[in-house]
Image: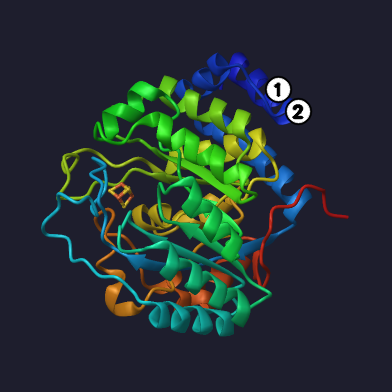
Amino acid sequence: MDEQAHQLIEQLAASHALPIEGYEYLVEHQSEQAARLLAEHARAQRIAIYGNEVFIRGLVEISSYCRNNCHYCGLRAGNASCERYRLDRSEILERVDMGHELGFRTFVLQGGEDPRLDDAMLCDTVAAIKERHPDSAVTLSLGERSFESYAALRAAGADRYLLRHEAADPDYYAQIHPADMPYERRMACLQELRELGYAVGAGFMVGAPGQTPRHLAADLAFIERFKPEMCGIGPFVPHHATPYAHEAAGTLEQTCYLLSIVRLIHPPVLLPATTALGSIHPQGREQGILAGANVVMPNLSPPDVRSKYAIYDNKAHTGVESAEGLDELDGRLQSIGYRLVVDRGDPRTKECD
Ligand code: SF4
């Protein structure tokens, strides 16, 4: 690691901010030594706030229908080979009840932008979850909706909303999305969610086609500015029926490097070791936790639909990536000094005693 990278890392760990050129320099000058130093600082700051606890979220993928055509996603409307399904209220509640018994206290309802997921059905389902499990949080991840829809869902009891910003650089955002998905609307949605009192999750892919260190630096600067309560960062993984079918996947190393940087930018952030990380490497989850992540989201969807929610190829949904594999996951995390907890896992602002 050169002297400048070393200084930038120490500055970031102390002040939680860098000029955009500093982030760009760190991305361009990634090295094993720099990654080690970043991860040491990231783990220390994560331990100070969250101890060695890892929060679990039960992920219920409620619809594989989507009206959009994001270039990177296997659920894109233009993919005629995608098997579509939609869970109804009772199927969702069944999975949530089962997850609650397993120890989940946060449920993430995720789906494509499916016009049939209307406010009435969603609000009713969210309210039912909150009524049956008042000790649990509900997170939604259903893409761009109207302000009125976000407001209705919040009033029904939804606590958090995940909407990856995908790319903070407007030109790069336009490169990986179709023309009918303007950058401005994505940014406005994030602001609206915050205004409505949701805990908001942003995030981006690592190693996506055409992505440069400058684009990633813009993402890091955005995280510094917006300070999302949650941040989902996973490697880009190609899907065979998208325009990016033949592009290379992002790497475990770069994803972990950026996880550490994000932890240092915003130490209280809830940072998942994503399924994509677990899908590209057998130790991906553990490596993500050791880089500073503190959340895992095992798959709680009905087993017969899991393979249909194929946003990228070879997405893991069994073993430690599934709700049924919690004991094995806990064992693997304990072997690296961490443990799963039964907890809503809300964002904390204060350091532990
Ligand atoms: S990324 Fe989301 S909005 Fe885009 S095509 Fe996939 S499911 Fe739809």
In contact (CB < 8 Å): disc 1 and disc 2: yes
**Residue that mark 1 sits on:** 11
Report the residue at 36% width, 57% height from top.
279
Q: Position of residue 56 (x, y in %)?
A: 57, 66
Residue 86 left/right relative to 283: left
User: Which amino acid lies under the numbered mark 1 shown in the image of this protein?
Assistant: Gln
Name the quadrant containing residue 175: top left
Report the residue at 28% width, 35% height from top.
177
CA distance separating discs 1 and 2: 5 Å
Badge 1 local density, few (<14 within 10 Å), some, or many (20+)?
some
Q: Which image quarter holds the C terminus?
A: bottom right
**Residue that mark 2 sits on:** 14
Name the quadrant containing residue 131: bottom right
Name, please, the residue furthest toward the right: 353
Q: Position of residue 283 (x, y in %)?
A: 45, 57
- Determine whether the beta carbon of the residue marked 2 sits less than 8 angstroms from the nearest atom of ligand 1: no
User: Which amino acid lies under the numbered mark 2 shown in the image of this protein?
Assistant: Ala
Q: Is residue 313 visible?
A: yes
In this picture the colour scheme is rainbow
